[in-house]
Structures are given as C-alpha cells and as structure tokens.
Amino acid sequence: MTHALRLVLGDQLSDALSALADLDPERDVVLMAEVRDEATYVRHHKQKIALVFAAMRKFAARLQERGARVRYVRIDAPENTGSIPGELTRAVEALRPGRVVVTECGEWRLVEALKAWAAEAGVPVEVCEDRRFICSHDRFRRWAADKTQLRMEFFYREMRRETGLLMDGDEPVGGRWNFDAENRKKLPKGVTPPGRKRFPPDAVTQEAMAHVARLFADHFGTLDAFDWPTTAEEAEVALEHFLRDCLPGFGDWQDAMKDGAPWMWHSLTSTSINLGLLDPLDVCRRAEAEFTAGRAPLNAVEGFIRQILGWREFVRGAYWLKVPEYRKRNFLDADRTLPWFYWSGETDMACVADVVARTRDHAYAHHIERLMVTGNLAMLLGIHPDEVDDWYMVVFADAYEWVEMPNTRGMATFADGGIVGSKPYAASGAYVDRMSDWCAGCRYDVKAKSGEGACPFNRLYWGFLERNRRRLRDNVRLAMPYRTLDGWSAERRREVVVEAEACRTELGAVART
Ligand code: FAD
Ligand code: DLZ
C-alpha cells in the first residue's frame, strides 16, 4: 500500500516544496497531472501552457532521478480525466494511500475545488503551508490587523527589517527606504538594452510545445519565439545573466519603454519564481550581494528588491486577505467591453500595438507597459474588470490569479477602490511620450487634446476624472487634477466628457450587453 500520495501542481516545482518535505521514496507516490481544466479555465497563452508542461515533465524526471516514485499523467493520456480532483480520485483508487499531502494552492479557485474534493475523498488530506513565500498568510494578517489602509511601502519596510535585506542595523542602507525618484529616466538615444538570455527548446520542451500546438490551437499567442527557462538550472543561468548584465541598469531604466525592445533591463524572473524554479528570498539576497560587492548601484538593487520583497509579497497577502469578495470588486462601475485590438494588436496607437505584439510573441510585457499602456487605457476606457482580468490572465506566461488580480483590479484599474494602491494611475499621453519613443512614429498626435487625430490617452483622461468625480474627488492624491477641473467652466467639463465618450466609442469600448 502507498504510504502517502503527494500532489505537486504545475506551479509547485521546487525541491523545497512543503508537500515533499518528509517524502519516503520507498512508500510514497508523487502525483503530477497535466489537465485540461488548468489549461482552459482561462484560455492561457500557448507559451504559458508549454512552459508549465515542459517544466512539470522535467521536474518529474528530476524527482525520479532522485529515487522518488512519480505517477505522471500527460495531457494526451487517454485515461486523463481533465481535472486535478479527477486525477486525485483516480490515483487514490489505484494506490489506496493512507493520506494525501498537498501544498496549499496559489489560486482561490483551486483551493475551493480541492476542499470540495477532500470532503468526499474518504482519505485524510493534509494541506501544508506554501513556505516559498517570504511572508506567511499569518504574518500578513497580523501586519494588516490594525491598519485602516494597506500600504505596500510600510509593509515593505517591515519585511526589510525582518529579513535584514539592505539594512544597516535598524536603518535602511543609504539612509532611505526608497530610491524610486532616481528610477524614472527615459532611455537616451544610443543606449542599447542588454538582451535576453535565451533557452531554445530542447526535445522535452519541443514535445510539450507540439502538444500545445495540437490541443490548444485556438488559444492566444504564438509558440515560435519560446525561450523560457524550464528547469531550476536554466533559471539560475538566467538569473546570473540578469545580475551581471542587467541589474546595474535596472533602476535607471526600470520605467523606460522602447519600440521593439521588450526586455530592457528587466529580470524576466517572474515565470521562474512563480513556477518555483527560483526562490524569491534567494533572488533578493543575490541582488543585495551585487550591491555589497560594488557591482550594482543602490537605486537599482533597492528598486529590484522592492519589487519582490515588497510588491510580490504584498499583493499575495492582499489577495488572500480579500478573496473571494475581491474578485467581484468594480469600484468605478466600469461597464464597457474590451476592444478587439487588445487581442489583434490592430490599432493605430503605436504603444498599444507594440505591447500587444509582445504579449502575442513572447507572453511578456514589462511592468510599466502592463500598468501604464494596456492597464491605463483599460481604466480610462472604463472596461469591465472581469474582461480586464481575463485578458491579463490569458496573455502573460507568469499569470496566476493571486498576483495578476491585485495588480489588475488594484494597481492598474482601481477597481478595488484603493486596497492595493492609494490612487488610480491615470495618465494622459504625456506619460507614454516621456517614458518611450513610441509617440514620434504614432499616427495620433500626443500634443493634441481633442478630435479624431489626438492621442486617445489625452481624449480620455479628463473625461475619466469628470465621469468618476463622485468616487474620486475626495482622493487627496488626485487633488491637483480635480482643482484644475474645478477651475474650468461647466461647459468645458461637459465637453471633456463628450470627447471621452466619442473616443470610447471610436475605439470599440461599448456597453456590455
Ligand atoms: P522585473 O521588473 O525584473 O521585477 C522583478 C520581479 O519582481 C518580478 O519577476 C516579479 O516577481 C516581481 N514583481 C515586480 N512587480 C511586481 C508586482 N507589481 N506585483 C508582483 N510582483 C512583482 N506579475 C506576475 O508575476 N504575474 C502576473 O500575472 C502579473 N500581472 C500583472 C498585471 C498588471 C496589470 C501589472 C501592472 C503587473 C502585473 N505583474 C504580474 C507584475 C509585474 O508586471 C511582473 O511581475 C513583471 O513585469 C515580470 O517581469 P520581470 O520578471 O522581468 O520583472
Ligand atoms: C497553469 C497551469 C497549467 C496551464 N496547467 C497545469 C496542469 O496541467 N497541471 C497542474 O498541476 N498545474 C497546472 N497549472 C498550474 C495551476 O493552474 C496552478 O497550480 C493553480 O492555478 C494554482 O496556482
């Protein structure tokens, strides 16, 4: 009889996974299953599915090489039930384990499905904490308990103190917690980004890609440029490349965007960290060591560590604190459909066309592109948060609801009403013009405020504020633009709403039926 059946999900590919902690290789069986439900609950980008399947197959082989017994169910196995609960049932029937051990799932949806399964399973189910995060659920809840507002910046300082990262005794190294003000530079002409470390698909990855091409042919995106690390060793090579060649410039160019340059100085670590191929605290310590050794400046290293120790841990904590109610939030009553060009890339807006092309070809866009191009546009257009969430979950290789949703419903569109961010990151075309080189070659005029040829961000911006006056007027961080609006005549304020409305219709953001 099998002693314990240990489930390892597609984003739990870590040697240190809690569900594998006391694995008895003689008597336990590890269950890994490629299932249709996980690939289609949203129609993930083809590269994301291929990445998960390839990484799962290689992780299973790694466990087997170390002597573990693995029951691996491939997507093309005729007996595959298509769901994680279905595969657990089949494995329990076949192996009769004394208990089932799982590490808690990353998404609320699957937690609920496994709870329902466990209630009927007829076998004890042990759920272990996911210790691959720096801040536990319990620690986050204790931090949040006495707060009227959750703010990343204060959470991040606690995490700095607790981990000792970039700390000099009780004080932050360099005398400041945050060097963001130095990290907002536009890329000057003639400066070339370092490029991506490439991992051309080996035979295992090619086979996974072939399965995806055949079984998920109608999903968004292309597979041709697949280059993701699929093992811990490859992820380590990619991290080394980042630390050596990109981290020194990460701070300066963190917010910069450039036509035809998707990677800039970004780390491309989110897919590997989210899958479990890299450990987030280790990544932070490795970045800190670059600063200590004098190979990377403080603004870069602090900026990078804040993304992981601060934002990544904060959004995870906020998600689990607020879910499931969070999934329904629509603070701005956004009610429009997502324009088709979010999928096709067929728009004259040069920035949006390039970002959509990146997501199609690489399942990647960097943070500011997600926030200030596609996210800002979706918010200004008033796209319903369900449609925005669906798009972000589909198009990125690193998308998991616990990290995607607080970024989308919170940071990018303010649909959560201020849980994750303190204000909507609404911006006119001036922002994209300042931080990129797209506007010079765009059909739309970024200097024009209204009319068919004007940049849509400009046409939408003031109308968005006026339309949402009741909900946003008291936000102190929006006091300045509202003071400007208040200084305008009633007629001019009406005009900006009419202008924005015309733009929404022209771009295809129409009322949902
Ligand atoms: P880098 O810029 O090199 O940053 C380093 C690491 O910091 C990232 O790998 C990531 O682990 C972490 N990080 C940075 N910013 C954030 C953030 N805001 N929240 C959480 N972690 C962060 N990230 C995801 O992993 N999955 C998602 O589904 C996702 N959806 C997003 C949706 C929107 C609307 C926005 C604005 C951001 C989203 N992010 C998401 C956060 C961020 O954009 C990506 O983590 C980052 O672009 C990944 O690229 P990178 O590894 O090159 O990141
Ligand atoms: C993302 C994903 C995909 C595409 N496929 C699988 C799969 O076939 N089997 C599996 O165990 N996990 C998969 N995953 C990851 C899960 O969706 C992920 O574990 C949950 O969303 C919880 O974060």
Image (cartoon, helix red, strand yellow):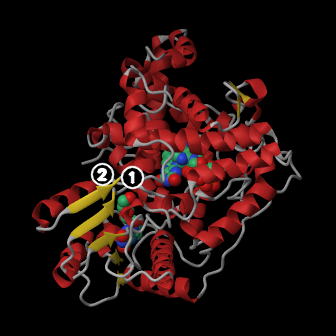
366 shown above or below 462: below
Please state which of residues 393 and 222 is positioned toward the viewer in this rendering: 393
Q: What residue type is labelled 1?
A: Glu
Q: Residue 108: which disc? A: 2
Task: Check whether the beta carbons of the residues at disc 2 and disc 1 lie within 8 A of each other.
Answer: yes
Residue name at image x 35 percent, y 63 percent: 42
Please state which of residues 421 and 354 is positioned toward the viewer in this rendering: 421
Judge: label 2 CB < 8 Å from ligand 2: no
Q: Would residue 175 be found to the left or right of residue 98 on screen?
A: right
Q: Where is residue 58 in the image (x, y as percent from the top left)?
A: 51, 80
Q: Residue 401: which disc? A: 1
436 shown above or below 470: below
Distance between the Cα atoms at labels 2 and 1?
8 Å
Judge: label 1 CB < 8 Å from ligand 2: yes
Q: Earlier in the sequence, mark 2 or mark 1?
A: 2
For label 1, the SS is helix
Q: Would residue 10 be found to the left or right of residue 489 on screen?
A: left
Q: Residue 306: which disc? A: none
